[in-house]
Amino acid sequence: MQLRHPLLWKMAVLQVCACLLLVWLVWNWGLKVERNTYFLEQPDRGALAAYAAEAEQVAASGDREALERWRLALQRREHTWVAVLDEHLQSLGTTPLTAEQISHLTFMRKLSWPMSKRLEDELPYVSIAFAQHPERGRLVMQLPERLLPPGLTPWTHVFTHGVVPGLLALALGLVLYRHVVQPLNELRERANALSAGDLAPLASSSVTRRPDELGELARAYEHMAERLRQSLQQQRQLLRTLSHEIRTPLARLKIASESGLPPEQLEQRLAREVEDMRRLVDDSLNLAWLDTEKPRLDAEDVVVASVWEALVQDAHFETGWPLAALVCELDSTCQVRVHLNSFAQALENILRNAIRHSPAHGVVRLSGQREGDTWWLVIEDQGPGVAAGDLERIFDAYLRLDGTQGTGFGLGLSIARRAIALQGGELWATQGAAGLRMNLRLPAANV
């Protein structure tokens, strides 16, 4: 199931992940860095272990005086306190431990423990067991000042608790900018270009392929720009066509008025030219209305054979085309769910186009079959047909193919396709057995 507001969830997940990472850095990695600054380096541990090995070697000889000399020498060399103790924490040298020194034994630390000064700013005491026989004794010494780990410096604290979280916040900002602000900037630039008259599409942009709200916004913009491109193209086409088509009959009217024709012939000429101009204007306005307004048409159940019969009678009366040549192979069971007037107009435009391009004694045939929830209707004539490359072009407005017969303006099929599309149907052309075949797919009636 598709989530609502995917961009919101992306932003929420991104911020939650950033917060969790920041917490991990502060409480895990930062703490680890802080603690590592309190541990002895490996070479220092080795040096202290070597002292314990020397003490074990001297103590093994049993010479308490020699052990005492060695202890005092180590104290002077490291400037610290040193003691060599047995398993009962008694001195193995000649100098016994004082009560204060014994109290220090409570806070002895192993080499692997963290080292830091106590609250009284006193160096820690380290206990190192003998290497060969740890049960026999140990070396205890106050950690020399030179070996004390530096601990957490102010700069380390700034880095772990300031620089790293700041870099993480900067990275989060860059990700948000790239994911949100950058597409918005691109849309803003395209909107500014659109206001300046640049109607270039966004089809090559990755923004239109995003599945979130920004992708929906980009696709809505592209749809708007496409509608503007189509409207502008139609307006230019309409102006060019009307300019050409209206100038021609006006020129003929001027010539006819100056030719000295008899009144009857002049009246007939005027009526024909005016009717052509009226039909051109009506068709152009109808096409523009279908394209720009996208009207919502109320559908009803319509019997296709009844509509065809009415149209055939009108065509027979106006053109003299024989009724026997306008064949319908459908019965009353063929019912579609359409808007009656627009469907009748589309069917009439197709029928008149077929009659206009059919030879004398040709046959125009309506047939069809039901396919699930739709009806597939076919209107086939016996005219010269259309080349395969022009089967789609014949639906372009104001297009008249070279060599075609008739005096139409190239609007009938364009209006028919738009009217059928508004009702959820399809209209396309194919090559028939003898001429052109017009295919309609329309929703079937609920019967």
Image: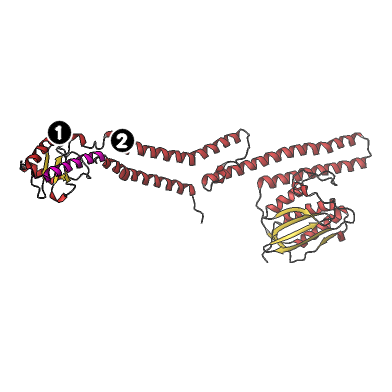
When the figure is inspected, residue 200 is found, relative to residue 342, above or below; the finding is: above
x and y, in percent, of residue 254 in the image:
87, 34
Q: Dot 1, crowdedness within 10 Å: few (<14), some or many (≥20)?
A: few
Task: Specify which label sits upstream in the sequence, 1 or 2.
Answer: 1
Q: What stretch is highlighted in magenta?
A: 41-63
On the image, numbered disc 2 is attached to which residue?
A: 158
- Quadrant hosting residue 432: bottom right
Look at discs 1 and 2 and give the one toward the viewer: 1
Say which of 132 and 145 sits in front: 132
Q: Which amino acid does label 1 sit on?
A: Arg
Name of the residue lying farthest toward the front: 61
- Estimate the spatial distance between the alpha carbons at disc 1 and disc 2, rounded to whole Å: 37 Å
* Residue that appears at 52% across and 37% down: 185
Residue 41 in view here: no
Say which of 194 and 102 sits in front: 102
Residue 126 disc label: none
Whether residue 365 sits left or right of residue 116 in the image: it is right
x and y, in percent, of residue 412 in the image:
77, 48
* Residue that appears at 87% across and 41% down: 270
Q: Is residue 61 magenta?
A: yes
